């Protein structure tokens, strides 16, 4: 099953992922600065870091005064998140595609979900759960792989279908097969607007200057065509 393959891949590369995440260009100088810029209020707020990985986002947000709760389906990632954050915050194992049974309704000012929703085939329940745990007028901030980039990268001929895809990742140690789900732009936006959110801002990001010296090839490519897309959505009352 695809979900099990995704979990095994992250369990296998967790240590290397954690080791490199601070300065790996696509994460540190492309995804994080553009995604964090969409969270306008941090100090004194309660933030859910959904699919938190080794807790880098949580580390940055807690340093700015947020109260952060994080979950991930990978037990190794959760252990690394606890170690990275010196047991500050609250981290636990949770599948992004299952009900968040341990979390109370209307308990967070912001939900962050960075580069994880493409591992979920049907977003409906996940978005409904984001809506449930957010306070009125709370914000959902997500980053995802850009649907136009994915359509080209995976050489798809079925743009409007939610399509299982896979590729090999070589940036976190030995090559690892990574499975995910490619979808159209409308399949990225409609689950939000049909489940209690309005879209406040959509960003097709560009890399920061620090990216260039580390990976000039992809720096040039990402300034010509986006690889990711960042969205801020607001919970309607």
Image (cartoon, rainbow, N blue to C red):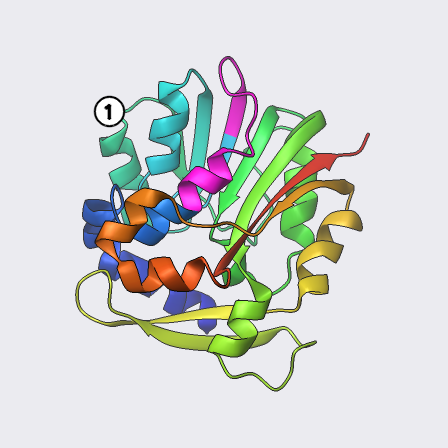
Q: Can residue 77 be seen in this view?
A: no
Q: Which residue is depicted at the point 52% across and 49% down?
A: 143
Q: Position of residue 110 (x, y in %)?
A: 58, 29
Along the line of sight, the residue nearer the viewer: 106 or 155: 155
Asked which secondary structure carries label 1, the reply is loop
Q: Position of residue 106 (x, y in %)?
A: 67, 26
Q: Look at the image and tell me in which quarter the C terminus lies.
A: top right
Quick one: label 1, few (<14), some, or many (20+) residues within 10 Å? few
Q: In this view, does 224 lie above or below 37?
A: below
Is residue 44 magenta-colored?
yes
Q: In this view, does 76 lie above or below 232?
A: below
Along the line of sight, the residue nearer the viewer: 233 or 209: 209
Is residue 69 magenta-colored?
no
Q: Quadrant of residue 86?
A: top left
The residues colored magenta run 31-47
Q: Which residue is depicted at the point 30% across and 64% down?
A: 217
Q: Can residue 87 be seen in this view?
A: yes
Q: Which residue is outermost to the top?
A: 44
Image side of residue 77 versus residue 58, left or right: left
Q: Where is residue 6 in the image (x, y as percent from the top left)?
A: 39, 65
What is the count of numbered marks? 1
Image side of residue 45 versus residue 168, left or right: right
Q: Which residue is depicted at the point 64% across and 57% down?
A: 123
Residue bearing mark 1: 86
Along the line of sight, the residue nearer the viewer: 192 or 146: 146
């Amino acid at each position: 099953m695809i979900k099990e393959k995704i979990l095994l891949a992250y369990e296998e590369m967790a240590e290397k992922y954690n080791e490199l995440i601070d300065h790996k260009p696509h994460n540190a100088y492309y995804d994080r600065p553009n995604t964090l810029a969409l969270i306008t209020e941090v100090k004194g707020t309660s933030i859910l870091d959904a699919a938190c990985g080794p807790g880098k986002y949580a580390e940055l947000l807690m340093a700015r005064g947020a109260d952060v709760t994080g979950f991930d389906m990978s037990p190794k990632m959760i252990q690394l998140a606890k170690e990275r954050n010196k047991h500050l915050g609250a981290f636990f194992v949770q599948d992004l595609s299952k009900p968040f049974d341990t979390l109370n309704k209307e308990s967070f000012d912001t939900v962050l979900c960075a580069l994880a929703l493409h591992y979920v085939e049907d977003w409906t329940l996940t978005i409904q759960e984001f809506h449930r745990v957010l306070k009125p007028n709370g914000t959902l901030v997500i980053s995802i792989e850009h649907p136009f980039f994915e359509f080209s990268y995976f050489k798809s001929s079925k743009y409007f279908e939610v399509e299982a895809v896979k590729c090999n990742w070589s940036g976190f140690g030995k090559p690892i097969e990574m499975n995910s789900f490619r979808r159209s732009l409308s399949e990225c936006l409609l689950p939000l607007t049909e489940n209690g959110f309005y879209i406040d801002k959509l960003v097709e990001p560009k890399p920061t200057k620090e990216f260039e010296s580390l990976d000039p090839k992809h720096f040039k490519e990402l300034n010509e065509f986006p690889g990711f897309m960042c969205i801020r959505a607001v919970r309607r009352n």
